[in-house]
Amino acid sequence: MKNIIKVCVLIVIAVLCIDPYANYKVDKGFEELNPDQCMAGAEIKRRLWKHYQAVSIYKKVQKKFPEYDGLAKTQYFLAYCYEKEGQDKMAMTEYSKYIELYPSDEFHSIAKKRLSNLEANASAD
């Protein structure tokens, strides 16, 4: 039992340290004009289920780095985060943009399935 408590405490400490690290990555990325670093911070936020914060980062990356070669990924994960936040209309809009703008990207087929599921759920309501 003591080992389980120790593991739980370590997990809590790790999670509490990871979020500030993500903030640091994002801030440093924008400061140094390094979109990959910003995306690394956004990914941490997304994996911590802080989708709202990740959305903000993805939008800022798109605006600040319009020539960034990872814009397809920002668009896909923007839609994904809206979906996870329960903002289905926004998710559908962003998935549609992704599908239109990046037809040969790696997440294309997944985005089409997610969009289709969201549309089916919307028409069922």
Image: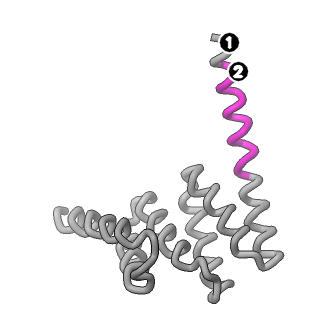
* Quadrant (top left, top right, bottom left, bottom right) of the C terminus: bottom left
**What residue range appears in magenta?**
5-19
Q: Which residue is mark 2?
A: 6
Residue 120 percent location from the top left of the image: 21, 65
Disc 1 is placed on an element classified as: helix
- Contact between marks 2 and 1 (CB within 8 A): the answer is yes
Residue 55 percent location from the top left of the image: 56, 68
Give the quadrant of residue 22: bottom right
Against 66, is 23 above or below? Answer: above
Say whether residue 28 is left or right of residue 80: right
Task: Look at the magenta stretch and give its main secondary structure.
Answer: helix
Q: Nearer the viewer, residue 99 or 22?
A: 99
Residue 121 percent location from the top left of the image: 23, 62
Category of crowding for the residue at label 2, using alpha-carbon neighbours closer than 10 angstroms: few (below 14), some (14–19), many (at least 20): few
Q: How many marks?
A: 2
Q: Which residue is mark 1?
A: 2
Give the quadrant of residue 36: bottom right
Q: Nearer the viewer, residue 125 or 100?
A: 100
**Residue at figure coordinates x 73%, y 35% from the top left:** 13
Residue type of the residue flagged with mark 1: Lys
Label 2 to label 1, Cα distance in Å? 6 Å
Against 76, is 51 above or below? Answer: above
Disc 2 is placed on an element classified as: helix
**Residue at figure coordinates x 72%, y 30% from the top left:** 10
Against 26, is 100 above or below? Answer: below
Say whether residue 70 is left or right of residue 86: right
Residue type of the residue flagged with mark 2: Lys
**Residue at figure coordinates x 65%, y 67% from the top left:** 39
Outermost top residue: 1
